[in-house]
Amino acid sequence: MSKYNFDEIIDRKGTYSSKWDGLDRYFGTKEVLPLWVADTDFAPPREVVDALNNRVQHNIYGYPIIEPEHYEPIIKWSKKRYGYDLDVNWIINTPGVVTGLCAAIQALTKEGDEIIIQSPVYPPFFSSVTNNNRKLVENELINNNEIYEIDFDDLEKKASSGNAKMLVLCNPQNPVGRVWNREELQRVIDICIKNNIIIFSDEIHGDIIYKNKKFNSLLSFSKEYYDNIIVATAPSKTFNVPGLFFSYVIVPNQEFKNDISRILTNLSISPGNVFNIPASVAAYEYGEEWLEELLIYLEDNVDYLIDFVKERLPQVKVVKPEGTYLAWLDFSELFESQEELRNFLINEAKVGLNDGTTFGNKGNGFARLNFGCPRSVLKEGLERIEKALVNRNNK
Ligand SMILES: Cc1ncc(COP(=O)(O)O)c(C=O)c1O
């Protein structure tokens, strides 16, 4: 028996939750079961809640300070779980990973430079490039029977254009759930190093990895690549605290680090606040056992989902993700257009999933389902889809 109760339903309505209170705005109705935004419906580790409660109860919320010792827990975590030595001098604290990405784009590339992303991928990768007037270059992943692979020939070609300055890597990959293996990552590194391309590796989902899969941070590769590598991570996904806005951008190249820090300073973005500093310290210091239990629960959830789809939604295609709490569902056999799929999910099944096309053109025919919820909620969502399909076939 787990000492954590991930089956517990915690009502999130009316808590300023984008996932639960933002349904109307995104789906045009409140009547959908939210299985979208990538946070979970689980309470974080008890120690994180206690750290927050203690800080709230202090009653004074003055300007904060973040000291090098506050980074000790993440340094120990990185060493213990992923085997690399994180130097405190490489860390920049940002409110979000995407803030770090935008700052790195502004600091290290120029307007008009090409930035490569590997779609389908997390939507802000697109907007971070285009909002900053850089040229978006897509190295689309290959869908091999729902198992996604990197198109290395295409990457070689695009990386050698002479104008490509940065690759934004998503590892583990949102939405397709791949945890890139060492061989794949080594090939990506080799291509980028040869063409003098900076790799911004978004590893925010790096702690959510399933059995027999291994997460390889880019910082676990040879130090000879460190000058070209930036890694971004956060306690957000791991401990379900994304609303606290606390992320780490890890930049071993000190010139790059100064350039990125300057952008943040110029916007007066200062590190941490009185809540997210103690919460992050507590999460990495005391949250490991909770995480191990969470991973078991999430893996049971995804196994349930895969079996359900195989047996009861056979025209939907999906494979088990290697990491993340996100499933990438292929509905293309069932619907002729994305509009039809969207209408089916929202108005007939009454489930709120992310529209596949927001992840790029390759997402046409797809929807992303977040299974970071109590099993009963997941079951309800899948049954709603099943029932709506039956109704449709009976018409
Ligand atoms: C791959 C990826 N990167 C970044 C984020 C968001 O990061 P942040 O809120 O720290 O900007 C998400 C959230 O879903 C994500 O999936």
Image: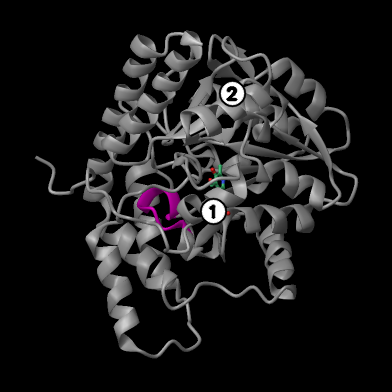
* Region rendered in magenta: 235-242
**Is 43 placed left or right of 150 in the picture?**
left
Is residue 369 visible in the rendered image? The answer is yes
Residue 199 in percent (x, y) is at 67, 41
Q: Residue furthest left?
A: 1
| Three-letter amino acid code of the residue under disc 1 | Gly
Residue 172 in percent (x, y) is at 50, 34
Residue 22's tag is: 1
Q: Quick check: 390 above or below 203?
A: above
Residue 334's tag is: none
- Pointer 2: residues within 10 angstroms few (<14), some, or many (20+)? many
Indicate which label's residue lies in the foreground, 1 or 2: 1
Count of labels in the image? 2
Q: Which residue is tagged 2?
A: 366
- Which of these two is toward me, 8 or 158? 8
| Residue found at x 34% / y 43% | 81
**Which element is circle 1 on?**
loop
Dot placed on the residue nearer the N-terminal end, 1 or 2: 1
| Residue found at x 81% / y 21% | 157
**Is 14 placed left or right of 104 in the picture?**
left
| Residue found at x 37% / y 11% | 310
What is the distance, in whole Å, between disc 1 and disc 2 at their CAs?
21 Å
Q: Quadrant of residue 156?
A: top right
